Amino acid sequence: MSRRIFLLCVLGWLVISAGAAQSTLLPDGVYVVKEVYRAHPGPDNDPAMVTYNYRIVDSTAQTYRYLRVERRHFVPLQLDRAPERVRQADDRSHLFLTLDGKSRKRLKRLTRKHTGGRVAIVIGGEAVTMHKIRTPITGGRLQITRCTDDACNYLFLELRDNVRK
């Protein structure tokens, strides 16, 4: 009898652990993109796989929808100050992010090491932008361009809690 209870407890723990792993989102940050996919390659609970939400910055169709990112070496989006929205002539907005000192140093190292590669900005568990690293980013200031008003407002609200206090 006690062996059955033990096995049921272990089974219950495994089910709960699997559910928690599936619902775990990547922290907001800048991640190195390892691979891009048109369709989800599986498994569904791969924590390094993120959806690329291209509708946030541009509503045109893209050829890829999923990104596999490097989880170990990323730059947390810890901000020195609140994000800034700047309206452009085409009625879209740019969102400027200023990283804190620690994140700024990590971004410099990451972009120096991966120059020529790609990075994605992940917010709320989704990749919202993807960029080729042309040169190391040393200033710690990031820009998310071509935001629609709704998307820019969403990102602004998501990121305002990332400001160091």
Image (cartoon, helix red, strand yellow):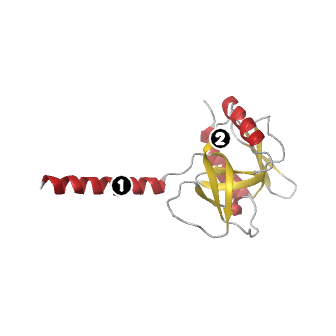
Q: Residue at x 62, y 56 (%)?
A: 126
Q: Which residue is mark 2?
A: 77
Q: Residue at x 59, y 51 (%)?
A: 124
Badge 2: how crowded within 10 Å, few (<14), some, or many (20+)? many
Number of numbered discs visible in the structure rendering: 2
Residue depth check, mark 2 versus mark 1: number of the one nearer the observer: 1
**Viewer-side residue, 45 vs 79:** 45
**Viewer-side residue, 158 vs 113:** 113
Q: Marks 2 and 1, Cα distance to the nearest angstrom?
A: 29 Å
**Viewer-side residue, 36 vs 160:** 36
Q: Residue at x 51, y 64 (%)?
A: 44
**Viewer-side residue, 154 vs 45:** 45
Q: Residue at x 23, y 57 (%)?
A: 8
Q: In the visual, does 54 lie left or right of 26? A: right
Q: Secondary structure at mark 2?
A: loop
| Residue 133: numbered disc | none
Q: Which residue is mark 1?
A: 16
Q: Quadrant of residue 40?
A: bottom right
Q: Secondary structure at mark 1?
A: helix
Q: Quadrant of residue 30?
A: top right
Q: Are marks 2 and 1 in contact (CB under 8 Å)?
A: no
Give the residue at the far right of this rendering.
89
Where in the figure is residue 85, as x and y percent of width and height? 76, 46
Amino acid type shown at disc 2: Leu
Where in the figure is residue 89, as x and y percent of width and height? 88, 55
Where in the figure is residue 147, as x and y percent of width and height? 75, 56
Amino acid type shown at disc 1: Ile
